[in-house]
Each structure stands twice: as structure tokens, then as C-alpha cells.
Image (spheres, grey):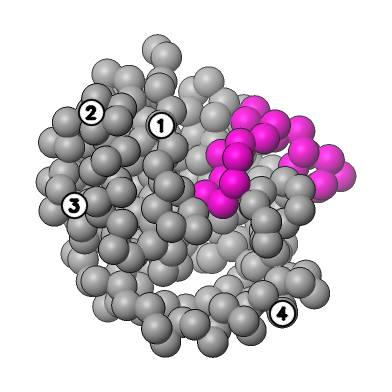
Amino acid sequence: MAVEIIPIGLGFDQCYVLKADGVIAVDAGAPNRGAHFARGLKNASIHPHDVHLVVITHGHWDHIGSAKDIRDITGATLAMHRLEARWLEGSRMPLSPGVTSWGTVFNKIHGLFLPLITVPPAKVDHLLGDEEMPLADYGIPGKVLHTPGHTAGSVSVLLDTGEAFVGDLAMNRFPLRLSPGLPIFADDPAAVSASWKRLLEHGATTVYPAHGRPFPAEVIRRALS
């Protein structure tokens, strides 16, 4: 089954709308981007109520910021790992530490602006665990995998055809990175490597990061070797 992949910019990052027999979204972007999401759906000729699920890859503010707005627009179920649901429900905004020199510097700059950001709280409807979640019931040939490392509750959507929507488990956008590769922030770098090995073993062939353009998974394979 072919899946149409529709990126929608929601601030510094983007969400992905996946359309096959059903429609889901991956991530909810920065705050106050609901209108951008609705416009992206309209441009793709997708009715908002056709979106039945929003998978949030992790709980950082730029991935949960418009979750409430998107659910209000679509009526979709919000799914998020149980370890981080409280971040959205309580408007919490933790940061992951830098794992490169630039990541450490960037984080300090990032922290200066964090008090100016507000994430509207939203109830998480479906708590994801460590087990796989098939997406067949939502008309998408793929699954959600727990892929910790960037954060403990990070998850990825992996299509049967090998496209992997990984949130911040990889990055490919300036000023985060000059070239595609592993994240410059992570709670557990060893878990990042383990999660990537799992994704590659499950057949990941193309990486769709939240920050930047897609790239071949072979880039990550080489980075791990």
C-alpha cells in the first residue's frame, strides 16, 4: 500500500501527515501553529476530520506546542509515550543536554528563550508503552516503535516500506547540523545508538527527521560503525 507523505512546517520543525487508507500525523510542532497545520491539510486536499491519530515523537516544546490546536481542528487521538505525557498535560518544557560542543552551546542559548514560550496543555488520549503499536487500524501500513535516547519516551513511526519518522533521533537542518546525522542533544547517547540499531534491523531505509530534509538511513549506519 502506497503512503503519501506530506510535510507541514510548524515553526523550526515540521510534522508529517501520512495518507493511505487512513490519515495520521506525526508530531505537533511549535505553539500557535494550528492555522499552519490546517492550511497544510487544505493544500493536500485532506479534510481535518480525516486525521484520526497524532503520534507525538517526544515531549519537547517544539513537538507538542500545537497539539491542543491540532486536536481541536481534527478531533484526532493524541498518542504519546507514557513517560512524557505529563510534559504535554502539564505544559512542562525540559531540555535534553548537548552531546556535542555545539549542542552544549546551542542549549544554553535555547534556554535563554525558553521562558518566553508557552505550550497549551492537552490531555493525551493514548499512552504508548515499550511495545510496538501497529497502525493498521488507522489505515497506515506501519507501526510505532519505542526509540529512546534523545529522550526516554521518544518514539518513531516506521512504515513497512522503510520510511522512518524519528522526531529528533536524527537531525538535518542548520543551525543544528551542517549535514544529516545523529542528534546534537540526547538524554542517553548509548540509547540513541541502540534505538537506531533497532530501527535499521526493522528495515529503516529513509530517515525523516523533524528538523530538516529526509536522507538515506545508510548515513546513520555509517555514523554508528
Q: Decide which of tag 2 and tag 4 comes sooner along the chain.
A: 2
| Nearest-to-viewer mark from 3 and 2 | 2
Distance between mark 1 and mark 3 Cα atoms? 18 Å
Judge from the rendering whether residue 65 lies leftward or rightward of residue 153; answer left or right.
left
> On the rendered image, what quadrant is the N terminus found in?
top left
Location of residue 96 (image quadrant):
bottom right
At 56% from the left and 51% from the top, the residue drawn is: 211
Tag 3 secondary structure: helix
- Residue 64 rendering spot, x and y as whole percentages: 35, 62
The residue pinned by badge 1 equals 6
Distance between mark 3 and mark 2 Cα atoms? 15 Å
Tag 4 secondary structure: helix
Distance between mark 1 and mark 4 Cα atoms? 33 Å
- Residue 98 rendering spot, x and y as whole percentages: 69, 74
Residue interval drawn in magenta? 205-225
The residue pinned by badge 3 equals 71
Disc number at residue 105?
4
